[in-house]
Amino acid sequence: MSTLIVPCVGRKIMNGIPQYLNRHPNGKLLIERSIEGVFSDKYRRVLIVLLKEDVERFDAESIIVQEVKGYPLEFVLLDQMTSGPAETVYQAIQKANVTEQVVVKDADNYLKTEEVPQGNFVAGLDLNTWERDVHNLRNKSFLIVNEQGNLLDIIEKRVRSDVICLGLYGFKRAADFVKAYEHLNDASYPISKLYVSHVISYLIGYSGRVFR
């Protein structure tokens, strides 16, 4: 079984409310769209990570509970903004006592998976086979993949390959994420904002973990 973590801590505001509380043209909340494409009964828990400020100001938790049905939702509330996406996931794992496989899903996009991938993985899109336009390419993460489909590295916000990250990441062990984050969150590493991609790069390069 796995735990799905959906961080909703970024300060993307649309129509005066957090982006994840806006609606898709089909009427569903964007946070529900983010979950429904990847969900299966292999997920034991779905952790929605919110800022307490959003709960108090926008009634975020109540709105999600009322409208997003059929999922084993749990909420992790953070007192203040984190330093970046990796810290958000780290705090969620710690506060919710997650020990099993972890899958992290960005809250601001829709992705359809046929089944829950197992182990360490990153979902990617090969631009050579994608016929539609992709906007803001420079704002994407790029995957460097070998012929066997194994990830060699993930580069944040720099065009380095023909494969972009789709915002779905898997970690076979929650403890791997925790240990890697704690190593990176050190004054000796000159990274001011840690992304999930930094954790994955560390696990590949320094811990010998294989991501597919």
Image (cartoon, rainbow, N blue to C red):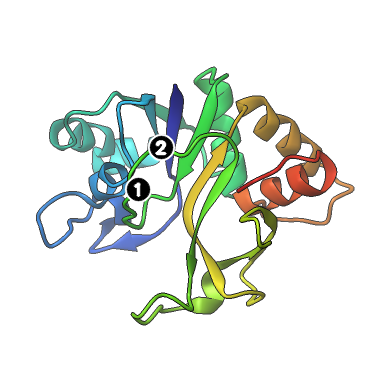
| Kind of residue indicated by mark 1 | Thr
Q: Position of residue 85 (x, y in %)?
A: 56, 48
Q: How far across and down, in percent of the image, does residue 52 sit?
A: 40, 34
Q: Nearer the viewer, residue 98 or 192?
A: 98
* Gap between marks 1 and 2 measured at Cα: 7 Å
> Image height check: is 31 above or below 190?
above
Instruction: Estimate how packed mark 1 is, as few (under 14), some (14 to 19) or many (20 or more) residues with alpha carbons within 10 Å.
Output: few
Relative to 21, residue 128 above or below = below
Q: Quadrant of the N terminus?
A: top left
The residue indicated by pointer 2 is: 116
- Where is mark 1, residue-wise? 113
Residue sitting nearer the eye, 123 or 108 = 123
Res. 178 image quadrant: top right
Q: Which residue is situated farthest in the front direction here? A: 148
**In the figure, residue 172 lies in which quadrant?**
top right
Residue at image point 19% right, 37% down: 63
- Label 2 secondary element: loop
Specify the amino acid type for callout 2. Answer: Val
The residue closer to the viewer here, 209 or 100, is 209
Dot 2 surroundings within 10 Å: few (below 14), some, or many (20 or more)?
A: some
Could you tell me which residue is drawn at 76 percent across and 56 percent down? 191
Whole-percent x and y of residue 188? 89, 48
Q: Relative to residue 37, is residue 166 drawn left or right?
A: right
User: Which residue of the protein is positioned furthest toward the right in this rendering?
Assistant: 188
On the picture, is 195 further left or further right than 23? right
Q: Residue at x 80, y 40 (%)?
A: 208
Q: Classify residue 208 as left or right of residue 141.
A: right
Which residue is at a point 67% across and 51% down the rendered structure image? 194
Q: Which mark is residue 36?
A: none
Q: On the image, which quarter does residue 152 sit in?
A: bottom right
Contact? badges 1 and 2 (CB < 8 Å): yes
Q: Secondary structure at mark 1?
A: loop
